[in-house]
């Protein structure tokens, strides 16, 4: 480095070289094919490539000395050079030569530093000191070049950061090792060495290599011999008691909080104490409290946003009322409550939690159509004859009082009674009319998963075509269609729901399982989309369609409700077409996240249920095949998975087979199944 070693290094030459980042002295014993046999100051005989020599002295030792004598002389030389290094003041040397472009050899540096006659020991000591310097000089092509003042300041900052990083790695590795090797959970007094480490671990668990601190954490984990994987970060956070075993990482990943800010909670609480009889224009709000109105919802429901009523009129007519909670009266466009609801986009229903779009003071309080309470509503009053033909439609602002809060099962049990019998009969006729208009109804069963307080999981399968489901779905479709038609006829832009052509099935594979046909056909449906202008909805068989029946749970419905109310008051549209398109874009992004969370988290709990029930085998329907895999549907849970096809197995689409669970890991979303051995 300070000098190029001669091609042939004589025996007895004192050499210096790096060994594990330490500079050592050695004496050459022999040279062969550019490799040296050395005796080191540590009394080791080694074979060294000549290119690794960083300094070769000009004053050799007597090669005839004994091994012990050579080692002792090397020890003495090394000690002298370390002592001489103490006289080397790098910053003073740098101040003398800053700005020079030629660079210094180690001998040049020694001549600047030492006043004595320069020996190999002075040169080696200067070189050692310069090689240890990380601030003032840059080594290149055998010379040391002084850095500029700006570069020196930059290097000082870099070194400071490196030292801080090393200190963190050291402290972090000790902490991590203590957590990793600990049994049980809870903080146990082991606090993180710096506060942001916990947040860094969370980010690593959620985003893997995209986490900002991934490079540092990867180095930290490797230093501690912990696998640098998101699962490791989850295990650490679990052991600290920061996260629990069933932590919903999908919510955290999408930055969706179940909690509302104090400001939003306070605003909702203030609104919840309002006297509803003093809100809005009382003269324009129709009093429908005398109607026998009732809700039909799941047993777990607390936010009731729609109700039904039936009145028998003269001339064989019926008036069906679809009453929708008037959330727009409480959540004003542009208010903090509105902006928060828009960010959330909709309520999220999960097996172990429910995250409302609006704070509970509204969604479960003054907006919710609770039995026995006066409530503001938007009422769709449809006059219909016994053949199911709608004779007239009217939309009014109203005040109602719910008489019964019913579950789907309760209505199923009472479907032969009035008013449920008539509502069901008329709903069936509405369905027939939609089918005649080209509707394609492909009902899949609904799988609902409930997690009890003690962690027990219940999976319930509901058939979509039960009487109560038909009543609710058809009358809500009718109300939504009425809203769309009223807005479209008046040229009002809105959040219309459109669906293109429903392509017919071209694969006529025979299967005795109806669910196979339904799955195949559904894949041919175009995706339903929002648009500010009306258009047809293919699978529903509606010439124009929107959704306005869940304003407590869906922001899009709240927007439509506002447009309707302004139209009913002969006021200009509250939203322009451009504003609606901006709303659509925001809702589309958020709704995709919510759909992902609901799908993934429900799947997680179904896999947990399989563990709980210790399931070993499952029925599986073959949906599709390629050369290597069969794509399967597990009908019991409506889960899809793949299985490798064995050479001796011949499968057919639409066939129901039995598969064995090979691996199940809910946290990593793994459901691996295998085919039975058909050769046995």
Image (cartoon, grey):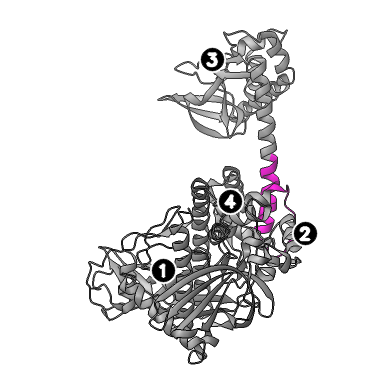
Q: Reading the chain from its start, which is encountered first: label 1 or label 4?
A: 4
Q: Reading the chain from its start, which is encountered first: label 3 or label 2?
A: 3
Distance between the alpha carbons at the discs numbered 1 and 4: 26 Å
Q: How would you rate the neighbour count of disc 3 (Cα within 10 Å): few for under 14, some for 14-19, many for 20 or more?
A: some
User: Looking at this view, is 338 or 57 the one in front?
Assistant: 338
Label of residue 672 in the image: 1
Mark closer to the observer (4, 2): 4
Distance between the alpha carbons at the discs numbered 3 and 1: 64 Å
Residue denoted by label 3: 3
Q: Are marks 2 and 1 in contact (CB under 8 Å)?
A: no
Q: How would you rate the neighbour count of disc 1 (Cα within 10 Å): few for under 14, some for 14-19, many for 20 or more?
A: some
> Where in the figure is residue 606, as x and y percent of width and height?
50, 73
Distance between the alpha carbons at the discs numbered 3 and 2: 57 Å
Q: Is residue 78 visible?
A: no
**Residue 169 inside the magenta-drawn segment:** yes
Q: Is residue 146 visible?
A: yes
**Callout 1: helix, strand or loop?**
strand
Residue denoted by label 4: 204
First to last magenta residue range: 167-196
Residue denoted by label 2: 189
Mark closer to the observer (2, 1): 1
**Callout 4: helix, strand or loop?**
helix
Q: Reading the chain from its start, which is encountered first: label 4 or label 3?
A: 3
Q: How would you rate the neighbour count of disc 2 (Cα within 10 Å): few for under 14, some for 14-19, many for 20 or more?
A: few
């Amino acid at each position: 480095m300070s000098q190029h070693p001669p091609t042939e290094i004589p025996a007895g030459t004192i050499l210096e070289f790096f060994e594990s980042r330490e500079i050592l002295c050695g004496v050459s014993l022999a040279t062969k094919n550019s490799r040296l046999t050395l005796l080191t100051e540590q009394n080791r005989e080694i074979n060294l490539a000549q290119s690794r020599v960083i300094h070769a002295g000009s004053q050799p030792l007597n090669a005839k000395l004994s091994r012990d004598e050579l080692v002792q002389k090397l020890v003495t030389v090394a000690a002298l050079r370390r002592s001489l290094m103490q006289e080397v003041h790098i910053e003073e040397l740098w101040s003398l030569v800053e700005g020079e472009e030629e660079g210094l050899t180690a001998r040049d540096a020694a001549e600047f530093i030492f006043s004595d006659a320069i020996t190999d020991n002075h040169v080696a000591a200067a070189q050692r000191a310069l090689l240890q310097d990380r601030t003032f000089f840059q080594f290149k092509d055998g010379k040391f070049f002084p850095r500029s003042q700006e570069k020196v300041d930059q290097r000082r900052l870099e070194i400071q950061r490196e030292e801080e990083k090393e200190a963190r790695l050291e402290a972090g590795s000790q902490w991590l090792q203590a957590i990793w090797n600990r049994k049980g959970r809870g903080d146990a007094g082991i606090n993180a060495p710096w506060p942001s480490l916990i947040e860094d671990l969370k980010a690593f668990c959620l985003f893997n290599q995209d986490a900002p601190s991934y490079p540092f954490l990867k180095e930290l984990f490797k230093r501690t011999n912990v696998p640098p994987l998101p699962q490791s970060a989850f295990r650490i956070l679990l052991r600290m008691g920061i996260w629990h075993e069933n932590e919903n990482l999908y919510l955290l990943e999408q930055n969706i909080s179940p909690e509302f800010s104090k400001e939003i909670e306070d605003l909702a609480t203030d609104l919840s104490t309002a006297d509803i009889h003093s809100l809005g224009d009382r003269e324009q709000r129709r009093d429908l409290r005398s109607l026998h109105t009732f809700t039909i919802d799941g047993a777990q429901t607390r936010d009731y946003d729609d109700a039904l009523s039936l009145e028998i009129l003269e001339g064989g007519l019926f008036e069906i009322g679809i009453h929708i909670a008037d959330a727009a009266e409480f959540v004003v466009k542009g208010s903090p409550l509105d902006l928060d609801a828009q960010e959330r986009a909709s309520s999220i229903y999960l097996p172990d939690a429910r995250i409302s779009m609006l704070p509970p003071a509204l969604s479960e309080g003054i907006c919710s159509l609770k039995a026995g309470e006066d409530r503001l509503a938007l009422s769709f009053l449809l006059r219909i004859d016994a053949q199911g033909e709608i004779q007239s439609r009217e939309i009014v602002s109203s005040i109602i009082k719910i008489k019964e809060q019913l579950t789907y099962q309760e209505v199923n049990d009472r479907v032969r009674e009035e008013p449920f019998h008539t509502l069901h009969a008329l709903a069936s006729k509405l369905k027939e009319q939609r089918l005649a208009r080209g509707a394609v109804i492909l009902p899949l069963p609904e799988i609902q998963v409930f997690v009890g307080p003690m962690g027990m999981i219940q999976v319930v399968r509901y058939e979509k075509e039960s009487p109560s489901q038909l009543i609710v779905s058809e009358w809500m479709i009718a109300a939504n269609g009425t809203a769309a038609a009223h807005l479209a006829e008046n040229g009002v832009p809105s959040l219309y729901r459109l669906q293109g052509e429903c392509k017919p099935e071209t694969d006529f594979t025979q299967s005795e399982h109806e669910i196979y046909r339904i799955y195949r056909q559904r894949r041919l449906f175009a995706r339903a989309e929002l648009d500010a202008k009306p258009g047809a909805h293919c699978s529903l068989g509606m010439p124009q369609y929107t959704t306005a029946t869940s304003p407590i749970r869906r922001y899009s419905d709240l927007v439509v409700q506002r447009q309707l109310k302004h139209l009913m008051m002969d006021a200009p549209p509250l939203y322009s077409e451009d504003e609606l398109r901006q709303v659509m874009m925001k809702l589309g992004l958020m709704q995709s996240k919510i759909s992902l969370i609901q799908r993934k988290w429900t799947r997680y709990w179904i896999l947990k249920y399989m563990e709980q029930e210790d399931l070993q085998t499952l029925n599986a329907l073959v949906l599709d095949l390629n050369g290597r895999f069969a794509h399967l549907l597990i009908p019991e849970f409506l889960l899809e998975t793949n299985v490798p096809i064995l050479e001796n197995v011949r499968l057919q689409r639409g066939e129901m087979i039995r598969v064995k669970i090979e691996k199940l890991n809910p946290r990593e979303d793994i459901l691996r199944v295998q085919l039975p051995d058909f050769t046995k």
